[in-house]
């Protein structure tokens, strides 16, 4: 068996490689960007209906007033802060995946989105952003 020089075990390396390929194939056409530093970055789903694109973002523990949704130079920009309350006050963590801190996700909007009609709301820890299609795109 060949030695793995990456410092990761094979399953971890494989997961990172799959994530990288997924980013290249799926995220890039929409202009999704992931931070290069290991920061908290909420996960998103993007799907399309006849009338709109729908972006759903997992934001557990975040209040609607702590999320900012804006359009900047043709990009949809999502910003906010999450604070994970730790129940352990003594001892050492053995494993920790939940992250706190500011997040920012930027998504390139296609020309077929009616930017002035974008709507956003948070329900049960999920941000729903409706990106209505222009009338011309709907009839195509």
Image (tube, rainbow, N blue to C red):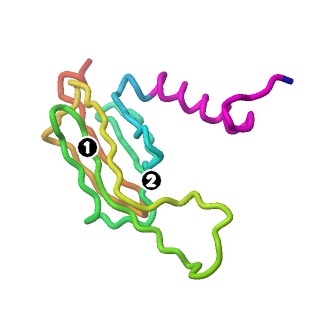
Q: Nearer the viewer, mark 2 or mark 1?
A: 1
Q: CA distance from mark 2 to mark 1?
A: 15 Å
The stretch of residues the image draws in magenta is 2-26
Tell me if residue 81 is in the magenta stretch.
Answer: no
Q: Which mark is residue 119?
A: none
Residue identifier under label 1: 77
- Which one is nearer the viewer's eye here, 40 or 136? 40
Q: What residue is drawn where x is 61% and y is 81%?
A: 90
Q: Is residue 105 above or below residue 32?
A: below
Q: Pointers 2 and 1 in contact (CB under 8 A)?
A: no
Callout count: 2
Can you give x and y, in whole percent of width and height, for residue 100 in the image? 44, 62
Predominant secondary structure, magenta span: helix
Q: What residue is drawn where x is 46% and y is 46%?
A: 43
Image quadrant holding the N terminus, namely: top right
Q: Residue furthest bottom?
A: 89
Q: Is residue 100 above or below residue 70?
A: below
Horizontal side, residue 27 vs residue 112: left or right: right
Can you give x and y, in whole percent of width and height, for residue 26 in the image? 46, 26
Task: Point out the tag, 2 or 1, that comes first from the N-terminus.
Answer: 2
Q: What residue is drawn where x is 38% and y is 33%?
A: 48
Q: What residue is drawn where x is 24% and y is 50%?
A: 69
Can you give x and y, in whole percent of width and height, for residue 93 in the image? 64, 68
Give residue 63's quadrant in the image. Answer: bottom left
Helix, strand or loop at label 1? It is strand
Residue identifier under label 2: 58
Q: Is residue 8 above or below residue 90?
A: above
Helix, strand or loop at label 2? It is strand
Q: Residue furthest top?
A: 140
Tell me if residue 14 is in the magenta stretch.
Answer: yes
């Amino acid at each position: 068996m060949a030695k793995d020089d990456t410092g990761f075990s094979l399953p971890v390396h494989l997961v990172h490689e799959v994530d990288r390929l997924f980013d290249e194939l799926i995220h890039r056409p929409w202009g999704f960007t992931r931070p290069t530093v290991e920061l908290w970055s909420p996960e998103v789903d993007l799907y399309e209906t006849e009338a709109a694109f729908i972006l759903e973002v997992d934001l557990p523990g975040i209040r609607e007033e702590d999320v900012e949704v804006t359009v900047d130079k043709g990009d949809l920009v999502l910003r906010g802060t999450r604070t994970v309350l730790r129940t352990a006050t003594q001892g050492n963590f053995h494993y920790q995946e939940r992250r706190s801190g500011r997040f920012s996700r930027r998504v390139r909007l296609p020309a077929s989105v009616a930017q002035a009609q974008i709507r956003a709301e948070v329900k049960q820890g999920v941000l729903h952003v409706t990106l209505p299609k222009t009338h011309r795109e709907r009839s195509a």
